[in-house]
Image: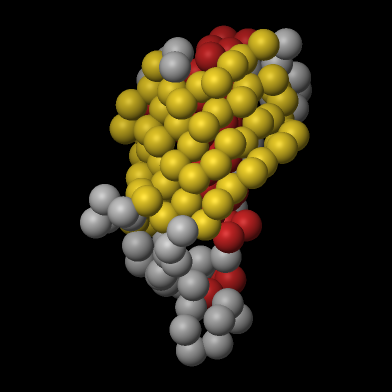
Amino acid sequence: MTKEEIISKLPYSKPFLFVDEIISVSENGVEGSYTYNENLDFYKGHFINNPVTPGVILTETMAQIGVVCLGIYLLDSNINSDTKIALTSSEVEYLKPVFPNEKVLVISEKVYFRFGKLKCKIKMIDNNGVEVCRGTIAGIII
């Protein structure tokens, strides 16, 4: 499965698609990127006159790239319109704010994938190579 095919199978669309590119993918992990466009609606109120990307959006970006993209790759041809994907747990530590127009790199390492449950260690890095958040996220694909 190509990187473009993986993105096309994501169950999201703009404005809730937080994957621009998959850089690499294997059985053991995935790397991808996303740029937070300054016109995204949540910046209007978070925070007034000092927009910062909400932590829940950072977590969602990590989950979309680090868990869902990897899960689609691992399931390959078993993904179809009836496939259900759900976040089952997350523990994320936020280290540095992410501002409008920043591009981030998400690096995910598979911890395990069994019985449809995928658990990954994930980190997000900014354009300067600084880690902005990290954690463990798990999801189920049925």
Estimate the x, y position of residue 49 in percent, counting from the top left.
48, 89
Q: Position of residue 27 (x, y in %)?
A: 45, 13
- Picture quadrant where residue 31 is located: top left
Residue at the limit of the structure toward the bottom, as seen here: 49
Residue 89 sits above or below residue 37 on the image: above
Left or right: 101, with 134 as reference point: left
Q: Give the image quarter of residue 57.
A: bottom right
Residue at left offset 57%, top offset 71%:
41
Q: In the image shown, does 5 or 70 lie closer to the viewer?
A: 70
Extreme residue in the left direction:
128
The color scheme shown is: secondary structure
Q: Which residue shows up at 66% across the image and 41% down it?
A: 90
Q: Is residue 52 visible?
A: yes
Q: Is residue 17 visible?
A: no
Looking at the picture, does residue 122 appear above or below residue 82? below
10 horizontally vs 25: left or right: right
* x and y percentages locating residue 48 in the rendered image: 55, 87
Q: Is residue 62 above or below residue 109?
A: below
Task: Judge left or right: residue 98 versus residue 93.
Answer: left
As displayed, is residue 108 above or below residue 58?
above
Q: Position of residue 1 (x, y in %)?
A: 43, 15
Determine the residue positioned at 51% across, 66% down: 53
Q: Quick one: 29 or 20, which is closer to the camera? A: 29
Q: Quadrant of the C terminus?
A: top right
Q: Quadrant of residue 72?
A: top right
Residue appearing at x 49%, y 37% in the figure: 122
